[in-house]
Image: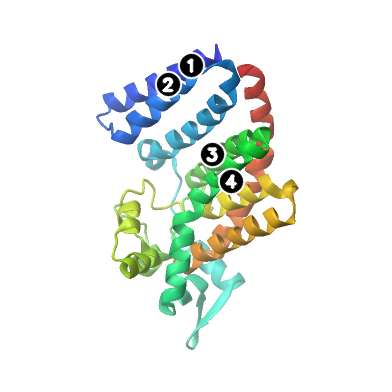
Amino acid sequence: MFSYCVAFLAVAHLSCIWLLGDVRGEHVAANALLFALAFLPARWQWLKRSGLAFWLTGVLFDSQRYFIEALRGPIHTGGLWQWEQSWFPAKLGDRQTIWAEFFWERHLALLDFLCGFCYIAYLPAFFAVFVVLLWKSRPCAELLAWAFLVTNVLGVLTYVAYPAAPPWYILEYGPGPAQLDAPGSAAGAARFDALLGISYFEQFYSRAPNVFGAMPSLHTAYPVLATLAVWKRGWAWRLACGLFAVAVGFSAVYLTHHYILDVLAGVLAAFLGWWGGKPIFSYVQKRAS
């Protein structure tokens, strides 16, 4: 029964996207892959369960453009900036500001490269940990997949309940009424593109479905999740994943994409996602067996 439900989800989603006229190559590929996973032999149930968690996460984020504007509350453009300035002040010349603006004005080419790399690697690093755990501890890897889904659900719910402009938006448009047609921006990550002569971040953020999703930082949440998943594997794993999580959190602020408050909220979302993923993983494991 579980296999048929998974196959139905793949067909239903692709049909809906086709009816809306929004089908892209990645939609066809993702749904075809999920449909194929649905009918794997019993010994591959773990792959089907994990694949479903990641597929649901992808659908959630891809579908934001259909519901986010209708559901979200008033957009906050200046509140986070003011709180940040009070709680985590930075000095820029003779005035007090926030660290995101400080780094916008005072940046180094080496940090542009390292932080840009972290911002590219945050998701591949997460999936690398997932693959390693499939080999070392398959139940832990499956739990990580479902915790990933829960963390992203928490993120999107926060985007709806507390839509907030990122620091780069305030620097460009100010703290007044929200400019709903504001396009996504690579912000400080554009310096990484310029260093390498590419347009990766420019193209990525030009397709962002939700400009007002600063809180929480899911860039930070993912490596924190990976750290929680490897915590019992020893200090070397904790240190490696923990340091990378700190680097991504710093990069989020340095590249002017997030406030420190967003980073802290991302850490909290990861812990809640890890805790909330456990009962969901247990339920799906029982239903799919």
Picture disc at residue 35: 2
Picture disc at residue 129: 4
Q: Work out whether residue 2 can be spotted.
A: yes
Whichever of labels 4 and 3 marks the residue nearer the N terminus, that label is 4
Quadrant of the image containing the C terminus:
top right
Mark 2 and mark 1 in contact? Answer it, CB < 8 Å.
yes
Q: Where is residue 267 in the image (x, y as percent from the top left)?
A: 62, 54
What separation in Å lies between label 2 and label 4 (alpha carbons)?
Answer: 25 Å
**Residue 182 vertical placement versus 286 (above, below):** below
Mark 2 and mark 3 in contact? Answer it, CB < 8 Å.
no
User: Residue shown at 46%/58% (left/top)?
Assistant: 119
For the image shown, how many numbered marks are present on the structure? 4
Whichever of labels 1 and 3 marks the residue nearer the N terminus, that label is 1
The kind of residue on which mark 3 rests is Val
User: Residue shown at 52%/73% (left/top)?
Assistant: 99
Mark 1 and mark 3 in contact? Answer it, CB < 8 Å.
no
**Residue 72 vertical placement versus 120 (above, below):** above
Q: Work out whether residue 214 can be spotted.
A: no
The kind of residue on which mark 4 rests is Val
Residue that extends furthest to the top in the rendered view of this protein:
1
What separation in Å lies between label 1 and label 3 (alpha carbons)?
Answer: 27 Å
According to the image, label 1 marks what residue?
A: 39
What separation in Å lies between label 2 and label 1 (alpha carbons)?
Answer: 7 Å
Mark 2 vs mark 3, foreground winner is 2
